[in-house]
Every structure is written in structure tokens, then in C-alpha cells.
Amino acid sequence: MRIVLFGAVLALILSGSSVGAGERAKPKKTHTVTMEGMKFQPAVLTVASGDTVVWVNKDLVAHTATAPDGTFDSKLIAPDQSWKLTVRTPGDVAYGCTYHPTMKGTLKIGK
């Protein structure tokens, strides 16, 4: 009985890893974009697929983080509020504020 149980536990341990020997899964990160002075700061942000981006509104007026291609839309982010998005698809995504067309940013999403 002990041998069978030990074998079952060992099989579970060995089958639980999807990362090959010598490979390491990249830890996911959280990045912050500040909306302040009627700008996205940083205006260009490089992230990895699976990372989270948080937009924080430090201005006195509401803003959005909206991709014209429909990739994402925060809707209204009131002053002193935030919105977050976990990015999945690699590529460059331009975005802006619906209310303030001069506010523009870009996410560069890697694999």
C-alpha cells in the first residue's frame, strides 16, 4: 500500500510542472500609467503578455484609456481613481483619452 501511495504522489509531483528542465516561467508584472498634466506617463510602455497595466488618474478631470481598434476601453476614470487591464495579445496598441484627443499613449506588448 505504501509503495502504491508513494508512486502516486511521485507521479503527481512530476506531472505538475509544465516548464521544461532549465526553463523558468517569467513572473508577471504590474505596470502603472499615470494620467497627470493631461498626459499619459509614460506615453509608451513596454510590457509582456500576461502583465497588468494600471492607469491612475491624478488630474482634476476624468479621463479614459481607450484603444480606437476596440482592444480595450476603460470607460470613465474619475480623478483619484484607477482602472486595470491584464494584456494578452502581443503587438503595439495605440490608445488615447476619449475626452481629450491630445492625450495619446502606446502599449508595446511582447510575448
Image (cartoon, rainbow, N blue to C red):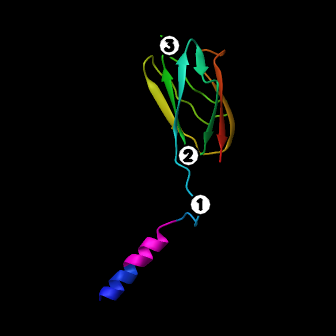
Q: Magenta stretch?
A: 9-17
Frontmost residue, 44 versus 22: 22
N-terminal-most mark, 3 or 2: 2
Residue sitting at x 56%, y 57% = 24
Q: Is residue 85 left or right of residue 5?
A: right
Q: Which residue is mark 2?
A: 50
Circle 1 residue = 23
Instruction: Check contact, mark 1 vs mark 3: CB within 8 A.
Output: no
Question: Mark 3 Cα within 10 Å, few/some/many (few <14, many 20+)?
Answer: some
Cα distance in 3D space between marks 3 and 2:
28 Å
Is label 1 or label 3 in front? 1
Q: Using the image, tell me which numbered label, if any, was put on residue 79.
A: none
As helix, strand or loop, the secondary structure at mark 3 comes to loop
58 or 63, which lies in front? 58
Q: Is residue 38 above or below residue 56?
A: above
Membership of 12 in magenta stretch: yes
The outermost residue toward the front is 22
Per the image, the residue denoted by label 3 is: 59
Q: Residue at x 59, y 21 (%)?
A: 40
Q: Of helix, strand and loop, which one carries label 1?
A: loop
Q: Which residue type carries mark 2?
A: Gly
**Residue 7 lies in what quarter of the image?**
bottom left
Answer yes or no: do the residues labelled 2 and 1 have beta carbons within 8 Å? Answer: no
Q: Pick whichever of labels 1 and 3 is earlier in the sequence.
A: 1
- How far separated are the C-alphas under marks 2 and 1? 18 Å
Residue 74 % position (x, y): 52, 29
Q: Please rate how many residues cluster around mark 2, counting C-alpha atoms within 10 Å: few if below 14, some from 14 to 19, many from 20.
A: many
Amino acid type, residue under disc 3 in the picture: Asp
Amino acid type of disc 1? Glu
Viewer-proximal residue among 18 and 20: 20
Where's residue 35, x and y in %?
A: 54, 19
